Amino acid sequence: MRNRFNACLIALGGLLAPALSANAADPPDGVAATVSHDAKVVGDTVKHDAQVVAAAAKEGAKQVAVAAKEVAHDVAVKSKEGAQEVAAAAKRGAAKTKAAVQGAKADKSENKPAQ
């Protein structure tokens, strides 16, 4: 009896399998079109969002470049001013040293006894 029951189940499965597989493989036309349309809409949205992000990143990069250029210019100006101040201080120091050396020479010649 058990063998007959199994044989009936196998026969029933064999009859229903083609009908079920055909039904699962072919969704209704409206569903396939809706899924395709939804996928296209999602793809277009993702593409648009990526373009917006890229444009924002490009604009941000431009702003950073402008700010960096301004900072570099300010640093160059301050460096030049600093170098000029150092050069002026060195020049003053050299002049003082020269005056001190000349003053010391003058003092030596004044302190020499007449021969």
Image (cartoon, rainbow, N blue to C red):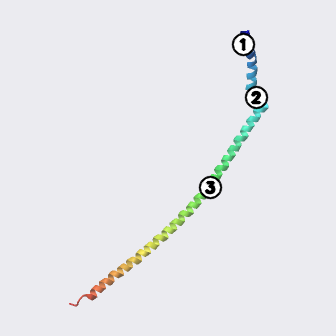
Element type at mark 3: helix
Residue 84 horizontal side relative to residue 100, left or right: right
Gap in Å between the C-alphas at discs 3 and 1?
72 Å
Task: Identify the residue position indicated by label 2 in the image.
Answer: 27
Q: Front-most of 10 and 89?
A: 10
**Residue 115 appears in which quarter of the rendering?**
bottom left
Residue 83 horizontal side relative to residue 67, left or right: left
Element type at mark 1: helix
Task: Identify the residue position indicated by label 3 in the image.
Answer: 60
Q: Is residue 30 above or below residue 53?
A: above
Q: Which mark is residue 113?
A: none
Q: Earlier in the sequence, mark 3 or mark 1?
A: 1
Closer to viewer: mark 3 or mark 1: 1
**Residue 18 appears in which quarter of the rendering?**
top right
Residue 99, position as x, y percentages in the image:
36, 82
Amino acid, disc 2: Pro
Amino acid, disc 1: Asn
Q: Residue at x 43, y 75 (%)?
A: 89
Closer to viewer: mark 2 or mark 1: 1
Residue 71 horizontal side relative to residue 85, left or right: right
Q: Which mark is residue 6?
A: 1
Amino acid, disc 3: Gly
Q: Earlier in the sequence, mark 3 or mark 2?
A: 2
Residue 32, position as x, y percentages in the image:
75, 32
Residue 9, position as x, y percentages in the image:
74, 14
Residue farthest to the bottom?
114
Q: Front-most of 103 and 15?
A: 15
> 10 Å neighbourhood of mark 2: few (<14), some, or many (≥20)?
few
Tag 3–tag 2 contact (CB < 8 Å): no
